[in-house]
Amino acid sequence: MLLLENLRKQVLDAALNLIKYRLVTLTGGNVSGRDPETGLVAITPSGMEYEGLTPEDIVVLDLNGNIVEGKWKPSVDTKFHLYIYKNRSDINSVIHTHSTFASCFAALNEEIPCVVTTLANEVGGSVPVARYTPVGTDEMGPAILEVIGDKRACLLANHGVVAVGPDVRHALVAAVMLEDAAKVYFAARCIGKPIELPESEVIKAKELFLYKYGQK
């Protein structure tokens, strides 16, 4: 029986959806999920195209990075995923993308203000920028947690995007909504000066999405 089969399926499904929503190209980005009961983490393998993967190809690790099950090398960004899990018990999924419009603002080292309610819904408001750190180093995790707070996404300076959530589905939705809002903000800035939402309206939009939107 495949260890953490359901979680591995969720991670793979999210990875395939990153391609569907055009948030990654080729083998860029990565997805992980943590099992709250065992503390084990399922993460996409390094340098492999998502379309050809099966749940068996998703690597299972412990929080120290030891491979528990899987035949492939895990993502090169495994260190920052594990750092987040070790330090944030409320986060059970991490998704990294290089989505085009959000990455434009990462290249500018500029946060994305909350000018549309959709950014407040799942992401929780304006999107901060984590300081630049070299890829694959021990510095990335701390840099992310320095800025992300209670938001479900942040930009990585000169790099890309990290989205998080209490489960894989919520992290995916945050990544998708962030890119959609980044497109709107980019276009609005080309036309004029976007108006940022007051914090009171950000809170209302966030609570509406969390507690009233969708079905029980």
Image: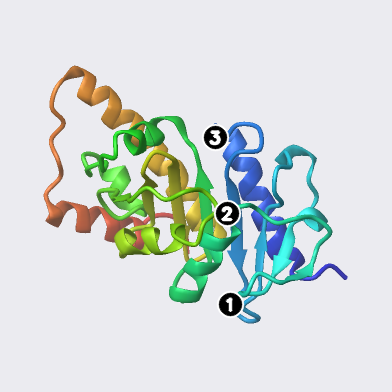
Does the residue at mark 3 contact the one at mark 1 (Cβ under 8 Å)? no
- Taking 63 as reference, is 152 above or below it? above
**What residue is drawn where x is 61% and y is 35%?**
19
Q: Residue flagged by tag 1: what amino acid is it?
A: Pro
**What residue is drawn where x is 11% and y is 49%?**
198
Circle 2 sits in a helix, a strand or a loop, which is it? Answer: loop
Q: CA distance from mark 2 to mark 1?
A: 21 Å
- Taking 54 as reference, is 101 above or below it? above
Q: Residue flagged by tag 3: what amino acid is it?
A: Tyr
User: Which residue is the extreme one toward the top?
Assistant: 191
| Left or right of residue 119: residue 15 | right
First-in-chain label (2 vs 3): 3
Q: Residue flagged by tag 2: what amino acid is it?
A: Asp
Circle 1 sits in a helix, a strand or a loop, which is it? Answer: loop
Q: Which residue is mark 1?
A: 36
Q: Which residue is mark 3?
A: 21
